[in-house]
Amino acid sequence: MSTTQNTSFFNDVCSFFDHASQFTNHSAGLLDQIKACNSVYRFRFPIRKGNGVEVIDAWRVEHSHHMSPTKGGIRYSDMVNEDEVMALAALMTYKCAIVNVPFGGAKGGIKINTKNYSLAELENITRRYTVELVKKNFIGPAIDVPAPDYGSGEREMSWIADTYNTMNPGQLDAMGCVTGKPIALHGIQGRREATGRGVAIAIRECVTVTEDMKSLGLTPGLTGKRVIVQGLGNVGYNTAKFLIEMGAVIVGLCEYEGAIYNTNGLDLDAVVAHRKETGTILGFSGAASEFANSAEGLEQDCDILVPAALENQILASNIDRIKAKIIAEAANGPTSPEAADVFIKRGGIIIPDMYCNAGGVTVSYFEWLKNLSHVAFGRMDKRYEENANLNLVSMVEKMTGVSLSLEQRGLIIKGPSELELVNSGLEETMVRSYHEIRETKMSNAKIGDLRTAAFVGAINKVAVSYMNMGIWP
Ligand SMILES: NC(=O)c1ccc[n+]([C@@H]2O[C@H](COP(=O)([O-])OP(=O)(O)OC[C@H]3O[C@@H](n4cnc5c(N)ncnc54)[C@H](O)[C@@H]3O)[C@@H](O)[C@H]2O)c1
């Protein structure tokens, strides 16, 4: 299947790319340009730790400048490395193209185990990381816009926004330099849950296609579908939460300390509360069985497996023991090309990462637009709105001499809130993109799977941008 030797995560992404590119008709040179990472910035900076100094390794990779700004999260992990950041940046390019978000792909990495640092040290690291990016022109609302990823969240995004803003006094659009900020600091409603909500919508769309479910021996629809989720962080927790709302049953949960399982379903919030109290999901009273090794949790009986932690979880070495019929890649790169090949050949469906977790960047785009437009999304705070609309109602009544009915008043004051706008935009994007990918798959029997179809669509869109742009000089 691949023309690239698989020695790394980035090579895995290139391997998927190479396989899909045979279904496009672009020149080898253009394909090379799309595939390559345009800028890789590796840097080291010191922080004070205790009475000494510690040097931190960090990266920012801008994979593709076919659109500006570039966009992608920052991973805080002691496992992060240059290859991983390059792979994640490349996935961002294809992801944005799939959901028609007009950004190039980027990603950042800070090599730390967040558990080993105090809050003040984490803030120092984040602010210094931002300063290094500013110095090299690797951040800015029109240049490169980071977001949360594994190990980072709203708190870190606030520090980044404040550092950038402080270093660029008077820059009107400064708050658009990063997304995933808290609501009180120019964030947007619904961003926190967006990736998980998007994953749940992606799964729902997949299981509603009767013909595809028939081929898996499953009934269409989410009701009663048994799901195992790996990772109880931002993406995993929210995916599980929305899947439950949509009628699915969470039968298994895996965290790095182990896994729990109950074929009758697990109470998600009770598990989270238990973990908060004890530091582990193990020992949860509602579990029928538990496994000290997290990976064993992936191999239990279920219809849908949702890896939502890290890459390289489903490999040639364990794919034969995976019982799920659908793998929904909430994490980036959880399935190796070899494992994916085996799974597809035995008739399984993989909802590929580059589409499945695109809800985050979709809503990040809305946040960035809100920051640049300097206008609140949706209707205003209810108190103001009611006053404003009451004025409007009495104005209309005075002008027409007619008393408006309650219904007519209702028509005037009703309007979508920011959250309703965000969620409907997200819903529309995830639904449309799923069927676009599936149609590409169905258009050529040789394409064979959703990931290849997603890559074909993404490659074609990025190719058109590069061709329109031309080469300068
Ligand atoms: N946050 C976003 O908006 C976003 C968007 C798109 C993609 N993603 C991807 O989703 C994945 C998770 O990101 P997140 O933001 O939820 O991170 P997070 O840090 O909030 O949560 C990750 C969780 O995975 C757990 N974990 C780590 N290793 C594990 C293992 N071996 N087995 C089971 N659990 C393990 C961690 O303990 C943590 O609870 C990453 O691949 C990330 O790139 C995140």
Image: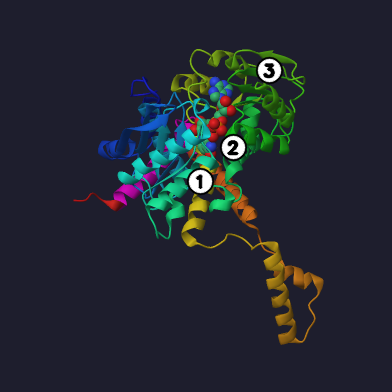
Q: Is residue 352 visible?
A: no
Q: Is mark 3 within 8 Å of ligand 1?
A: no
Observer-side mark, 2 or 1, equals 1
Task: Identify the image quadrant of the N terminus.
Answer: top left
Say if 420 sits above or below 7 in the image.
below
Disc 3 secondary structure class: loop
In this rendering, position of residue 231 left or right of residue 246: left
Observer-side mark, 1 or 3, equals 1
The residue under label 2 is which amino acid type? Answer: Val
Observer-side mark, 2 or 3, equals 3
Q: Position of residue 37 (x, y in %)?
A: 32, 36
Pointer 2 local density, CA inside 10 Å: few below 14, some 14–19, many at least 20: many
In this rendering, position of residue 166 left or right of residue 342: left
Front residue of 201 and 371? 371
Front residue of 431 and 198? 198
Sequence order check: which comes first, mark 2 or mark 3?
A: 2
Q: Is residue 25 visible?
A: yes
Q: Which residues are magenta?
A: 443-468
Sequence order check: which comes first, mark 1 or mark 3?
A: 1
Task: Write down the residue under mark 3.
Answer: 282
Label disc, if present, on residue 158 of the rendered structure: 1
